[in-house]
């Protein structure tokens, strides 16, 4: 197992460590519910340095990214980020990612840890046609996610950058806790606002400790998972993968059919033919916790789909989940059944997200 630069900091905080995407990562410190609610009501701090970072630059950078990425990066201003996915050759999803426009000819791609090698090889293969400059900088950067309604007050004491004026999905470079050239991004995976900080490895520990001293609660991967499920966000490997139609997953909003990209024809055919399955969110009407892999059924017990993510929501105090079901059943307000230990537990299909900030 690999270790992030903050491994010893997690051990010092008595974090429970688990293997994740090839790394030893903290799954929790003081408890999932406490950490989850800290993000919803105060500020939580995550080490997500296992994520991958690719720098794509040069005159052909935009053409390469436009071809391998679903969204339209020509819409990006310098200092702006965009979410999307990389389609594979069959209309599935290689990975979902963020693209940051650094300057006129430089872009930072932030990819999932488990997919770094796969994504890199895909970029290199397609770049034979384009000739952009590619750098895999994944081992050079630490990434901290400071999330929650008090994130700004926690961070602003450590930087002269006017972080409160950074709009959602925009970023700026600044000094944080004396560490130069930190990319401060108004993004996150929790739905409670905050920042993601891209830090040169040698500065990660100082910033981590400074944020905790300012009141941020250390949070592990378990709380990160419950938070993103409450928001209805996809997790690669659970809710989307190489076999998933992005339209079934509800990702048509970040699919720019106005340009050419890998598998555009196949995805347009999916759109015209109609998708057989659709990702939905549901709330259990009785006690129970839906888990990945549980069957979803109709009232007669017929199999109509499968759970891809589920948890007991700390914010709602109910079992919630997401899954793919037959399109004709995927109507908000419909009752479906989660098969838990051979029992059909009723659930109501609901619009996403489950959680709405107060």
Image (cartoon, grey):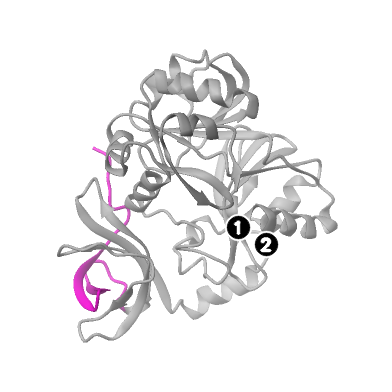
Location of mark 1 (residue): 70
Q: Residue 261 bears which disc, if any? A: 2
Q: Residue 88: where, in percent of width, then height? A: 65, 66
- Please tell me whether residue 59 belongs to the stretch shown in magenta: no
For residue 294, the mark is none
Would you say residue 340 sits in the magenta stretch? yes
Give the image quarter of residue 155: top left
Q: Which residues are magenta?
A: 329-358
Q: Is residue 126 left or right of residue 256?
A: right
Q: Nearer the viewer, residue 302 or 258?
A: 302
The residue depicted at 44 percent of the width and 63 percent of the height is 250
When the figure is inspected, residue 73 is found, relative to residue 5, above or below; the finding is: below
Give the residue at x 60% y 25%. Answer: 182
Give the percent coordinates (x, y) of residue 140: 68, 34
Query: Residue 212's quadrant in the figure?
Result: top left
Considering the numbered disc 1 on the image, is that residue within a helix, a strand or a loop?
loop
Up-down: is 340 above or below 204?
A: below
- Closer to the camera, 355 or 218? 218
């Amino acid at each position: 197992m690999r270790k992030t630069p903050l491994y010893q900091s997690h051990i010092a905080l008595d974090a429970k460590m688990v293997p994740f995407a090839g790394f030893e990562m903290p799954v929790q410190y003081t408890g999932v519910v406490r950490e989850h609610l800290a993000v919803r009501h105060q500020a939580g701090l995550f080490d997500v340095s296992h994520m991958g970072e690719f720098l794509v630059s040069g005159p052909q950078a935009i053409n390469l990214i436009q071809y391998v990425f679903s969204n339209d990066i020509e819409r990006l201003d310098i200092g702006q980020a965009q979410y999307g996915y990389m389609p594979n050759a069959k209309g599935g999803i290689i990975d979902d990612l963020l693209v940051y426009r650094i300057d006129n000819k430089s872009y930072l791609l932030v990819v999932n840890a488990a997919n770094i090698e796969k994504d890199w090889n895909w970029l290199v293969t397609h770049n034979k046609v384009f000739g952009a400059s590619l750098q895999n900088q994944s081992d050079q950067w630490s990434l901290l996610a400071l999330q929650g309604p008090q994130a700004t007050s926690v961070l602003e004491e450590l930087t002269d950058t006017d972080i409160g004026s950074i709009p959602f999905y925009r970023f700026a470079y600044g000094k944080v806790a004396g560490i130069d050239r930190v990319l401060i991004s108004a993004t996150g995976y929790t739905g409670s606002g905050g920042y993601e900080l891209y830090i040169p490895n040698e500065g990660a520990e100082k910033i981590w400790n400074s944020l905790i001293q300012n009141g941020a609660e250390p949070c592990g991967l378990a709380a990160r998972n419950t938070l993103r499920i409450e928001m209805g966000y996809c997790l690669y490997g659970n809710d989307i993968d190489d076999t998933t139609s992005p339209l079934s997953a509800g990702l048509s909003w970040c699919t720019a059919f106005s340009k050419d990209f890998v598998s555009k024809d196949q995805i347009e055919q999916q759109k015209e033919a109609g998708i057989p399955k659709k990702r939905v969110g549901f709330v259990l009407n009785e006690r129970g916790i839906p888990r990945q892999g549980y069957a979803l059924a109709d009232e007669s017990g017929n199999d109509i789909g499968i759970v891809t993510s589920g948890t007991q929501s700390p914010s709602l105090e109910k079992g919630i989940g997401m899954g793919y079901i037959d399109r004709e059943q995927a109507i908000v307000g419909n009752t479906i059944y989660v098969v838990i230990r051979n029992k059909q537990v009723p659930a109501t299909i609901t619009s996403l997200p489950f959680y709405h900030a107060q």
